[in-house]
Amino acid sequence: MSNVELVQQSLERFVRTGELVWDVTDPEVVIVDHDIMDGSEYRGHEGVQRWLGDWSSAWSHFTMEPEEVIDAGDSVVVIVRMKATGAASGIEIERRDGIVYRVYAGRIIRLDYFNSAEQALAAAGLSA
């Protein structure tokens, strides 16, 4: 399975069920959410769960729809259309977020989440 196929299947399952595909997520995975101001890193499967909780707690409702999946060599960039309502503010947003997945030996080893497609493309060395 290619890196692109692995990321697509993992993301499709998450969007559909809210569950990650743990057997393709490295036990030492690192997640950096560039949308969170303190720049925290989340490590390991427990870190993934904590990040998902932190991220989703900001929204009273959200949906994500993958728009593009781009092969960037050792990375895969996914551009998603996100629609969300702020939990505290009630403000509705719609934006194109970007996620950069690093894959090694058939496992996702790092995920960088950006609140803009352009930032994700730049982080992967691609132009917007």
Image (cartoon, rainbow, N blue to C red):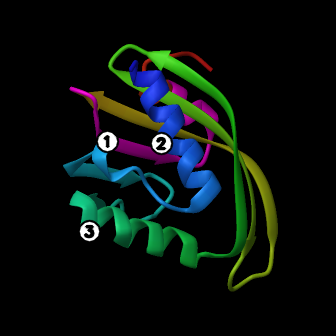
The x and y percentages for residue 50 are: 36, 72
Please indicate whether residue 31 sits to the left or right of residue 76 in the image.
Answer: left
Q: Is residue 113 magenta?
A: yes
Q: Reading the chain from its start, which is encountered first: label 1 or label 2?
A: 2
The x and y percentages for residue 22 are: 33, 52
Kind of residue at disc 1: Val
Looking at the rendered image, the disc whose residue lies closer to the viewer, 3 or 1, is: 1
**Label 1 close to label 2 by CB (< 8 Å):** yes
- Report the residue at 26% width, 61% height from top: 45
**SS for tag 1?**
helix
Residue assigned mark 2 = 10
- Report the residue at 31% width, 30% height from top: 103
Q: Is residue 80 magenta?
A: no
Residue assigned mark 1 = 24
Residue assigned mark 3 = 46
Which corner quadrant holds the C terminus?
top right
